[in-house]
């Protein structure tokens, strides 16, 4: 009985240590307002060719640390982009952008900070990623299933939010950017976000993928705070989704009632 009580007390002590108290609200940095991505929507401009290229433009690529199998997959995707037949799941409308692409969208972005969690949100939806900072860990492996935004847990190191991401949907479900960069569902990322000056947020990501990569992929993104009073508006992709492209590269011209009216080579 005495041993059982001692063990129970030790477990409570360890649980209390694991669930460290989140910071008080007044200790959180000021990330208020609406933010805009700087530098365009190539996910990793540091390795891009050409450097001033645009995501989704023919021939533009980056250099993730792919192994041979996934480099071939990427080259195949780039060829589909060149032929204008590479599908972007976002064009289906209603699907989340997911992680890490949420840091690569041209629409307005907002960050809502609370002591126990931080919300990452984009104007086009549904894109909300919750980062829990209340001391919890990831769920056990047998309870973790892939989602678009993954499972995110973190903590504050002074004014820097540090969070760990696992359980992200992989290739076939979402893109990193429209050059055709994809990852597997074994992606693991560590992200560090901090104010770099009054009106800039620096985001440093270390992406590890034991299935697709030969080593870590380090990527930096920067967001700029927009002028005071800037609003993020509601945007419903499905309202404008009238011209989907099928697997053969044909544009399906849709009428107001959603029925196909013609099929033309794009």
Image (cartoon, rainbow, N blue to C red):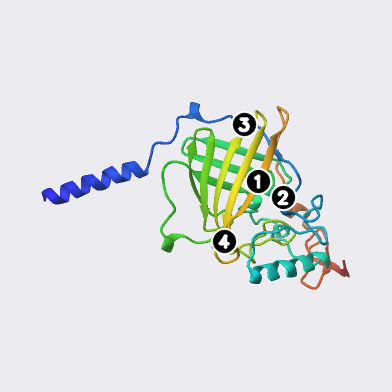
Labels 3 and 4 touching (C-beta < 8 A): no
Labels 1 and 4 touching (C-beta < 8 A): no
Q: Position of residue 60 (x, y in %)?
A: 79, 58
- Mark closest to the chain's N terminus, 4 or 2: 2
As measured in the structure, the alpha-carbon distance from the residue carrying label 4 to the one carrying label 2 is: 19 Å
Residue drawn at (51%, 35%) of the image: 114
The label nearer to you, 4 versus 2, is 2
Element carrying mark 3:
loop
Residue 209 tag number: 4
Residue drawn at (49%, 37%) of the image: 156
Residue 46 tag number: 2
Residue 32 tag number: 3
Residue 254 tag number: none
The label nearer to you, 3 versus 4, is 4
Residue drawn at (60%, 48%) of the image: 205
- Mark closest to the chain's N terminus, 3 or 4: 3
Query: Which quarter of the rendered picture does the C terminus lie within?
Result: bottom right
Q: Which residue is mark 1?
A: 220
Element carrying mark 2:
helix
As measured in the structure, the alpha-carbon distance from the residue carrying label 3 to the one carrying label 4 is: 33 Å
In the displayed structure, 141 sits above or below 28; it is below
As measured in the structure, the alpha-carbon distance from the residue carrying label 1 to the one carrying label 4 is: 17 Å
Q: Position of residue 168 (x, y in %)?
A: 56, 58
Mark 3 Cα-neighbour bin, 10 Å: few <14, some 14–19, many ≥20: few
Element carrying mark 4:
loop
Labels 1 and 3 touching (C-beta < 8 A): no
As measured in the structure, the alpha-carbon distance from the residue carrying label 2 to the one carrying label 1 is: 9 Å
């Amino acid at each position: 009985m005495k041993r059982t009580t001692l063990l129970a007390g030790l477990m409570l002590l360890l649980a209390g240590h694991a669930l460290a108290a989140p910071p008080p609200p007044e200790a959180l940095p000021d990330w208020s307002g609406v933010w805009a991505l700087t530098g365009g929507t190539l996910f990793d401009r540091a390795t891009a060719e050409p450097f001033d290229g645009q995501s989704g433009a023919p021939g533009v690529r980056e250099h993730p640390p792919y192994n041979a199998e996934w480099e071939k997959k990427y080259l195949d995707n780039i060829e589909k982009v060149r032929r204008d037949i590479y599908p972007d799941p976002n064009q289906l409308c209603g699907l989340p952008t997911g992680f890490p692409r949420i840091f690569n969208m041209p629409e307005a972005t907002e960050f809502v900070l609370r002591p126990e969690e931080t919300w990452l949100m984009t104007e086009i939806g549904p894109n909300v990623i919750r980062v829990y900072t209340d001391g919890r860990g990831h769920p056990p492996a047998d309870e973790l299933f892939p989602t678009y935004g993954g499972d995110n847990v973190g903590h504050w190191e002074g004014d820097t939010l540090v969070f760990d991401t696992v359980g992200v949907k992989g290739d076939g479900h979402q893109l990193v950017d429209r050059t055709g960069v994809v990852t597997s569902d074994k992606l693991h990322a560590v992200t560090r976000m901090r104010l770099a000056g009054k009106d800039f947020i620096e985001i440093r990501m270390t992406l590890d993928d034991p299935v697709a990569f030969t080593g870590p992929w380090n990527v930096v993104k920067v967001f700029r705070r927009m002028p005071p009073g800037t609003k993020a508006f509601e945007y419903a992709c499905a309202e404008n989704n009238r011209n989907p492209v099928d697997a053969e590269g044909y544009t399906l011209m849709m009428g107001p009632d959603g029925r196909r009216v013609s099929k033309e080579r794009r």
